[in-house]
Image (cartoon, rainbow, N blue to C red):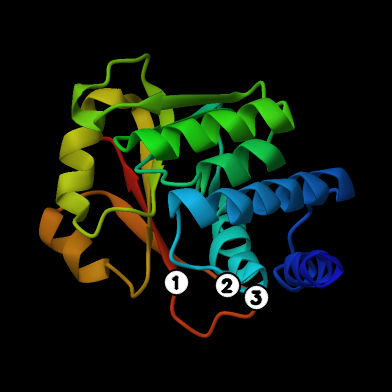
Amino acid sequence: MRDVAEKLAIGIAEMGLQVAPEKQQGLLDYLALLAKWNNVYNLTAVRNPLEMVTLHLLDSLSVLPYVEGESLLDVGSGGGLPGVVLAICLPGLQVTTIDAVQKKAIFMRQVKGELGLDNLQVVNARVESYEAEPFDMIISRAFSDLDLFMALTQHLLAEDGHWLAMKGVSPQQALEALKVKSKVCPLSVAGLVAERHLAIIENV
């Protein structure tokens, strides 16, 4: 695991992020659980722990500078990306992860228990039927269709809240077609050549 820890630390430094050593250890503990459970539950197609550092941990960490407010909902969280990563790094943020697949919710609950993440709530449901107090932010890596992402989660976003859509290529044209108040921020992920962008959409 030394190579994995080193790659994570170097990546965080390259991206100019501030993640304390104990939080980095939490991320490594999470990654170990993800790799272990993946053998049985098939949570992610990525099998190599070193690739997981780049494609899962560092990719999720790239949105850290844009996360604000007190509560966040991660829709289609899968194995907990980026929701669990954000819960580990931001203990003052109340994070709810939601996924319709039961085995993924079971895994995330195991992570919550083993890592003692008091600020994490895991929900096994379809987001369109989920009811809760409005969230300051709703984030997802899972939606290709921005319009659908917003439509299914509108009832869960606070009046002055923001959607955060993690994308590959820039979704600028799609956002212009939707006529929403938004901005697109390029994301830098250490070790990743592919394009990454974050669409920040205001609820107005």
Secondary element type, mark 2 = loop
Query: What residue is shown with label 2?
Result: 188
Q: Are marks 1 and 2 in contact (CB under 8 Å)?
A: yes
Query: What residue is shown with label 1?
Result: 196
Query: What residue is shown with label 3?
Result: 190
Within 10 Å of the Cα at label 2, are there few (<14), some (14-19), or many (20+) other Cα atoms?
A: many
The N terminus sits in image quarter:
bottom right
Secondary element type, mark 1 = loop
Q: Earlier in the sequence, mark 1 or mark 2?
A: 2
Q: Amino acid at mark 2?
A: Ser
Q: Are marks 2 and 3 in contact (CB under 8 Å)?
A: yes
Q: Position of residue 40 (x, y in %)?
A: 49, 51
In the rendered view, does 5 fall on the left or right side of 45? right
The C terminus sits in image quarter:
top left
In the rendered view, does 108 fall on the left or right side of 198? right
Q: Is 129 placed above or below 127 here?
A: above
**Mark 3 and mark 1: Cα distance apart in space:** 11 Å
* Residue lying farthest to the bottom in this orientation: 193
